[in-house]
Structures are given as C-alpha cells and as structure tokens.
Amino acid sequence: MVEFDQPPPDVGVAVNAPTAAPTGVPIGGMTGVAPPPVAQPAATPKGKFKRYCRECGRAFLAQRHTGEFCAIRCRQTFNNRRAERGRDLYDLVMTWRFQRDEAGAAQTLISKLAAHWRCKDERERAGRQSWNSIGDVRARHRYLGSELLDSNVAGMHRPGGRR
C-alpha cells in the first residue's frame, strides 16, 4: 500500500492537503481545525493520483482523477450498501410524500434509519461518509433544479396554470 503524510479526509477522498488551519496555525502536529480539502487531486510524477478509498480508507494511487476505490471489491461493497439502504428509504420516502396520513410515522422511521446507519458507519467504517453530497445528486438529476410551469411536483395541475 502507498503511505501518505496526511490522514484520510472524512469524505474518503485524498486531495491536496492544506498547510495551515483557518487561523493560520500550521496543522503538522498542532491542534486546530483544518479547512476542507481542495477539490482537485494532486497528480503524482507518474501521472497517478493520490487518493483514499471511500470504502476501506486505505491510500492508493488512482489511474484517473475520478478514482474513488482501491479495488473492485471495495466499489461493489460500497454500492451494495447504498442499494440496500436505498431500498428501505425509497418505501419510506414515497409513504411520507404521498400517504400524508402516515407521513409523521414515515419521517420518524427515516430519521431513525439515518441515525442507525450513521452509527453503523462510525463503528464499522471509522466514520467515513457513506453518502454523496447534494451537489452530486443534483448533477445526476438536473431536472430537479428545473422550474415547474404547469404542474406541481406531484404532477397535479396548478390552479390558473396553462393546460
């Protein structure tokens, strides 16, 4: 395995590490809060990119700047966990949104599931984040940012709207 100077960031992506905390105090051995990592990864002399696996947290050299996992097994494990969790979450979100009489119970269960998953991540994955940012979700689903003209999100026509 490859050894790097900095510990893996919370999101599991190795990037250029800052040299000073927000207060200007050097990070190396000092206490203080480090700023969030820079978005662009650093290329090594061989054209590979220093990264940390999103699943296991180990350092590796990625062939591409978008590399997130050190091995196929880590990628599959990460995606299988998300699929399993998403299966349960989908049912609860649809109940919350479209069966308003059960919305309160669904919202409570969503919160409990999220808390349970976070505790499990803390215990089994050293607290590494197992979800993507809101920006990533928006990038995958551009239509979510579009403006509705004739109907609302549920597909119902608005009063006075064009038909």
Image: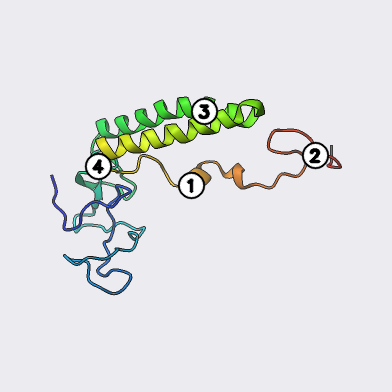
Q: Earlier in the sequence, mark 4 or mark 2?
A: 4
Q: Check if mark 2's residue and mark 3's residue have beta carbons within 8 Å.
A: no
Residue behind mark 4: 126
Secondary structure type for disc 2: loop
Q: Nearer the viewer, residue 120 or 156?
A: 120
Lower position in the chain sequence, tag 2 or tag 3: 3
Cα–Cα gap, marks 2 and 3: 26 Å
Relative to residue 89, is residue 144 drawn left or right?
A: right
The Cα atoms of the two marked residues, 4 and 3, are separated by 26 Å
Amino acid type at circle 2 is Arg
The residue under the point 65% across, 46% down is 146
The residue tagged 2 is: 158
Location of mark 3 (residue):
90
Give how far across and how far down residue 119 sits, in percent. 33, 37
Q: Secondary structure at mark 4?
A: loop
Q: Which residue is the site of mark 1? A: 134
How would you rate the neighbour count of disc 2 (Cα within 10 Å): few for under 14, some for 14-19, many for 20 or more? few
User: In which image quadrant can residue 15 be found?
Assistant: bottom left
Tell me which colouring the rendered structure shows. rainbow
